[in-house]
Image (spheres, rainbow, N blue to C red):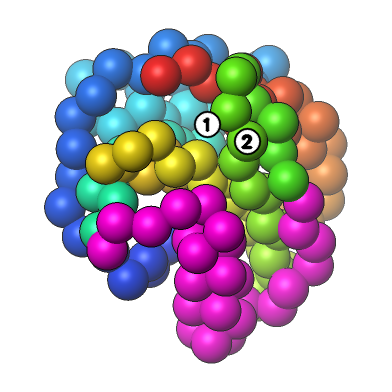
Amino acid sequence: VLALMLMISGCVSIPIKTNAPDSFAEYRDTQDFRAISPDGVVYQIRELENKPSADLKFWKKALKKHMIDSGYHFVFEADLKGKARLGYLIELAAPVQNEDYTYLIALYVEKKRLIVVESAGEVPKIKQHREAIITAMQNISF
């Protein structure tokens, strides 16, 4: 629905242990982890190269700046406490045709890779699933 456009490229394939948010169905036979709710909220996890090699502090600033410069509206940000590591959560908004969409992005830095967890959907639908989405974002192990 909404595409994350980071200033990085190259996918990395490292195992991630995760579950879809409550009430979401997992897609099978996809390279990245993907799931969808019955009402159309999407959730996915991607791994990208940490290129240029940088820490979470750098990527927090870079992600926020890039998304705002791309036309997304900033809503909220917070540190995200994942399993044994600190991450970053940003919430953005954007109009898509006649609807307003929410875009949640969690970011973890793990040495040579970035773990990017994204969820997007219409504002009222994301609100219904927000807690389950953030819980799933926090419960990723890699």
User: Could you tell whether 19 is left or right of 90 in the image?
Assistant: left
Which residue has dot 2 on it? 86
Q: Amino acid at mark 2?
A: Leu
Q: Residue at x 83, y 44 (%)?
A: 127
Q: CA distance from mark 1 to mark 2?
A: 26 Å
Residue 56 in the image: above or below residue 36: below
Quadrant position of residue 128? top right
**Residue 136: image location, x then y, percent:** 63, 23
**Earlier-in-chain disc, 1 versus 2:** 1
Is residue 133 visible to the viewer in this orientation of the structure? no
Quadrant position of residue 85? top right
Q: Quadrant of the C terminus?
A: top left
Q: Residue at x 19, y 29 (%)?
A: 13
**Of the pair 110 and 128, the residue shown nearer to us:** 110
Pointer 2 local density, CA inside 10 Å: few below 14, some 14–19, many at least 20: some
Q: Amino acid at mark 1?
A: Ile
Q: Residue at x 39, y 35 (%)?
A: 110
- Say if the magenta span includes residue 108: no
User: Could you tell whether 129 is left or right of 84 in the image?
Assistant: right
- Say if the magenta span includes residue 72: yes
- Which disc is residue 59 wearing? none
Residue 27 in the image: above or below residue 59: above
Magenta stretch, residue numbers: 52-78
**Of the pair 124 and 130, the residue shown nearer to us:** 130
**Of the pair 105 and 102, the residue shown nearer to us:** 105
Which residue has dot 1 on it? 36
